[in-house]
């Protein structure tokens, strides 16, 4: 395992978690107020993330001959089909019911919000059921 890659991943994860916490996205009540169109602050968070990712994915291969921590750029094809649409809808319903998204929930644990363990247990159970169903 490459130490540089591990440290870069750790630093990126810390930055991600800090950003989610700073933007209050780790609080389900804030997420639910966003989903009810009462608070649009998280729209700025998600919009900013989309812009950064779009720039990174589109500009980095043009500006760099190779990635900083790999030997070549990889394609990330995505397949849009019925399973993707159903999965996205189920994710949205779950998100809307509890106001918890997996990434912010894990970051919320780091901030001491232990009640998010229930949502993460449900997420893990749902993923397990889907994995068993897919076999």
Image: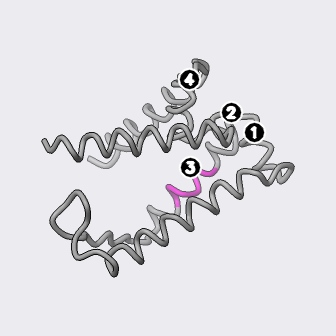
Q: For the residue labelled by badge 2, is the local secondary structure a helix, a strand or a loop? A: loop
Quarter that holds the N terminus: top left
Which residue sits furthest right?
38
Disc ID at residue 105 = none
The dot on residue 118 is: 4
Q: Mark 1: few, some, or many residues within 10 Å (few <14, many ≥20)?
A: many
Work out whether 115 lies above or below 25.
above
Counting residues from the start of the chain, the first of labels 3 and 4 encountered is 3
Q: Which residues are magenta?
A: 86-92
- Of marks 2 and 3, which one's residue comes earlier in the chain? 2
The answer to whether 106 is drawn above or below residue 48 in the figure is above
Is 126 included in the stretch rendered in magenta? no
- Kind of element beneath mark 4: helix
Mark 2 vs mark 4, foreground winner is 2
Residue 32 occupies which quadrant of the picture? top right
Quick one: label 4, few (<14), some, or many (20+) residues within 10 Å? few
Which mark, by number, is residue 27? Answer: 2
Q: Residues within 10 Å of mark 3 (few under 14, many from 20)?
A: some
At 56% from the left and 59% from the top, the residue drawn is 49
* Callout 1 touching callout 2 (CB < 8 Å): yes
User: Disc 3 versus disc 4: distance between alpha carbons?
Assistant: 16 Å
- How far apart in space, not on screen, are marks 2 and 3 (Cα)? 18 Å
Q: Is residue 116 left or right of residue 132?
A: right
The quadrant where residue 47 appears? bottom right
Q: Nearer the viewer, mark 4 or mark 1?
A: 1
Q: CA distance from mark 1 to mark 3?
A: 18 Å
In the image shown, does 51 or 65 lie closer to the viewer?
65
Q: For this rendering, which residue is in front, 18 or 30?
A: 18
């Amino acid at each position: 395992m490459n130490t540089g890659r591990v440290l870069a991943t750790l630093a990126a994860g810390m930055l991600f978690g800090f950003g989610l916490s700073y933007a209050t996205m780790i609080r389900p009540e804030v997420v639910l107020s966003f989903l009810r169109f009462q608070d649009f602050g998280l729209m700025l968070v998600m919009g900013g993330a989309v812009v950064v990712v779009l720039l990174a994915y589109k500009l980095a291969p043009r500006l760099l001959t190779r990635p900083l921590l790999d030997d070549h750029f990889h394609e990330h094809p995505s397949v849009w089909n019925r399973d993707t649409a159903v999965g996205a809808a189920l994710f949205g319903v779950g998100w809307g019911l509890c106001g918890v998204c997996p990434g912010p929930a894990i970051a919320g644990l780091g901030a001491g919000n232990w009640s998010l363990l229930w949502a993460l247990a449900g997420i893990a159970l749902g993923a397990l059921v889907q994995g068993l169903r897919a076999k």
